[in-house]
Image: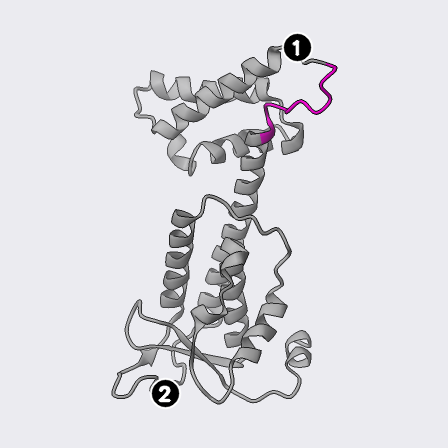
Amino acid sequence: MLESFEGPLDLLLYLIRRENIDILELSVSKITDQYMEYINLMKTLQLELAAEYLLMAATLTAIKARMLIPSNEDKEDEEDPRDELIRRLREYERFKKVSLELDDYSRIYRDFYPISELSYKKVVKDEKVAPLDLDNLVTVFNDLLIRHDALNSHDVKKDTISVREKMTFILDGLKNDEFIDFKNFIDSSEGRAGIIVIFLAILELIKMNLIECLQSKSMSVIYIKSKQQLENKEEVIYEQ
């Protein structure tokens, strides 16, 4: 049962969606009761519970208790006990949506746009290189996301990041017929979303036959190069 969820936030999001309510209208009392039903069922079945589920149970119980305490009407700016939980849920919901979109893109490109015979050239003298396949590309970007998540508790930049704009940004950076390390195009200030958008931009450019990629070996640096000199990159990209 719980194994079908990725964590306590995933379980909470499921319960909220099942009730067909907006996260901002979260009824802590009702959701806490439903969450505890799952937890108690797991205990009854003598199934091992991850500590994070028990921690969330304690957090929900504490918030529920605070919500039962009459608020001071004189304190208009009094903090809502739900604020932090709602923030975490909305952040998780956003990242889960992007993650699902990334999975969809990977599956679509693997099925319809295989990257099996990309052309390549030497990057370093006497270094043997090989065509880059989609699986390796996905693996490298997943590794980047994992490392990013390990070093950052959350992303603070909220500006919309456009795949089309990143496509133009990448093409602008590919000059002199040279291969460039794809990491040069990642802006750390854009956080997790920025990494994902760069990934999608590279996939789009490969599909449009505007760039080529290579690696010297599996899990090594990914290099990209423009396949043609373009007078008006924006026009080419946006007419697709």
Residue under label 1, please give it.
70
Residue shown at the point (51%, 85%) measured from the top left: 175
* Residue 18 picture location, percent across and down: 58, 30
State yes or no: residue 135 in magenta: no
Q: Is residue 159 above or below residue 8?
A: below
- Which is more toward the observer, 213 or 20? 213
Circle 1: element type: loop
* Residue 54 picture location, percent across and down: 39, 23
Residue shown at the point (55%, 13%) measured from the top left: 65
Answer whether residue 104 is visible to the viewer in this image: no
Disc 1 or 2, which lies upstream in sequence? 1
State yes or no: residue 77 in magenta: yes
Q: How far apart, in angstroms, are the residues tagged by discs 1 and 2?
A: 70 Å
Residue shown at the point (31%, 79%) measured from the top left: 130
Quarter of the image for residue 79 reads: top right
* Residue 168 picture location, percent across and down: 60, 75
Q: Which mark is residue 102?
A: none
Give the residue type that dot 1 points to.
Pro
| Residue range corresponding to the magenta coloring | 73-83
Q: Which mark is residue 121?
A: 2
Circle 2: element type: loop
**192 displayed left or right of 167:** left
Q: Residues within 10 Å of mark 1 (few under 14, many from 20)?
A: few
Residue shown at the point (49%, 65%) measured from the top left: 186
Q: Is residue 123 above or below residue 160?
A: below
Answer whether residue 109 is visible to the viewer in this image: yes
Q: Quadrant of the N terminus?
A: top left
